[in-house]
Amino acid sequence: MTDEWLSLSDAAKLLGVHPSTVRLWSDKGVLPVHRTQGGHRRYRRSEMLIWSESNKKSRESVVEPESMMQEAVKNVRMQISEGRLQAESWYQKLDDKARAQYRMSAHSLFQGLMTYIATNGEEASSEAYAIGYEYASRARRYQLSYVDAAKAFLFFRDVLIESVIKVYGDAKVSAKQSTEMYTKMHTFTDEILISLLQTFQKLENAKH
């Protein structure tokens, strides 16, 4: 039957992507999805086939979030174990609780980037603002300067970019696709940095 209902995992198999990719596309309105009374995602096979054909080109340029997340987490852990994080001047000013929160920062940054890529840049401004606000408010909470706040963000951004470069290199992605990805990463993270600095300034002004 061409119009049967599919579960999230079945839809992922049909599209040839990881279930986390289908979940992300569904939640952002990129993929046609229906909800059961219990809140479960369901997909029509016919809609998936039509969507797959019409979006084939754009899907080929997206590296799956799951594989990239695994690589990013591994890379961040490696950088920390190598002492790179401990060598950062801003990191040395933090207590253990603050350090733990900053080590988790790569995850929100990564998820934001994946959303940006999966939705072709839609809602990018709100995502960038939210992440920038998070970095700014955390920095002020732990008495870091705006310079240290920016350094902290750039540290995790660079680790993330290194991770993505490795994933693309291992996957032997074409130079054109790699260049497009790097451009998107820098565009998105530049917006976050601007949001961070603007938010930090607003919070400072509100104090006076």
Image (cartoon, rainbow, N blue to C red):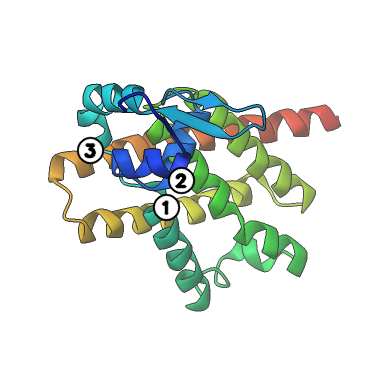
Q: Residue 145: tell me if it is visible.
A: yes
Q: What amino acid is labelled 3 in the image? A: Glu
Q: Is residue 80 left or right of residue 22?
A: right
Relative to 52, residue 80 above or below: below
Residue 20's tag is: 2
Q: What amino acid is labelled 2 in the image? A: Ser
Residue at the far right: name it.
208
For label 1, the residue is 66
Q: What amino acid is labelled 1 in the image? A: Glu
Is mark 1 in CB contact (under 8 Å) with mark 2? yes
Q: Residues within 10 Å of mark 3 (few under 14, many from 20)?
A: few
Residue at the far bottom: name it.
82
Is mark 2 in CB contact (under 8 Å) with mark 3? no
Q: Earlier in the sequence, mark 3 or mark 1?
A: 3
State which mark lies toward you, 2 or 3: 2
Instruction: Name the image quarter holding residue 22.
Output: top left
For label 3, the residue is 60
Rendering coords of residue 93 (x, y %)? 71, 64
Depth order, front residue of 127/17? 17
